Each structure stands twice: as structure tokens, then as C-alpha cells.
Image (cartoon, rainbow, N blue to C red):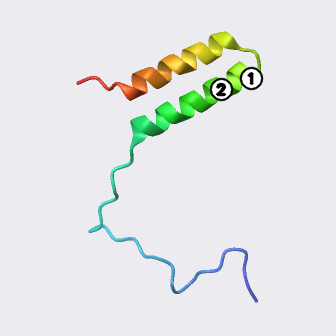
Amino acid sequence: MATAHPQSASAPEFRSDIKAAAFPTREYIGAMALEMARLARDEGDARLAGMLEQVAGVAGNPAA
């Protein structure tokens, strides 16, 4: 009988010798902030949209 979360023999195992690829965190934050700004503007909240656009700008220009 199948379970809700079957244990597959082909499921990947944890490997500590494999390094994860670098995730573009700042780019992701900037893109999400712009999307949220668009949503806020669509809802008529220009103040929140402006703040989120500032966040996107900061995310796009990391400090040295």
C-alpha cells in the first residue's frame, strides 16, 4: 500500500562533498521588491510602492 510520502530508492542522498551553486540573493530581493512595488501601486498605495522601489535600488547597488 502506498503512503502519502513514499521513500523512493532513487531519492538523492545528502552529500557533504557537493557545494551548492551561489544563489543571486540580492538580485532575487531586488526583483521581488519591484514586483511587490507594482502590486502596491496597483492597489493605490504609492507610499509603499516607493519604499519597495528604494529597497530594489539598494539591492541592486551593494556596498563595497
Q: Amino acid at mark 2?
A: Arg
Q: Position of residue 52 (x, y in %)?
A: 56, 20
Q: Amino acid at mark 1?
A: Asp
Q: Is residue 23 left or right of residue 51?
A: left
The disc placed on residue 18 is none
Is 32 above or below relative to 50?
Answer: below
Number of numbered labels in the structure image: 2
**SS label for mark 2:** helix
Reading the image, the residue beneath label 1 is: 42
* Rendered residue at 76%/89% (across/down): 1
The disc placed on residue 38 is 2
* Residue 24, picture quadrant: top left
* Rendered residue at 64%/10% (across/down): 47
* Rendered residue at 65%/26% (across/down): 38
Is 16 above or below relative to 34?
Answer: below
Label 2 CA crowd tier, 10 Å (few <14, some 14–19, many 20+) = some
Say if mark 2 contacts mark 1, CB within 8 Å: yes
* Residue at the limit of the structure toward the left, as seen here: 64
* Residue 8, picture quadrant: bottom right
**SS label for mark 1:** helix
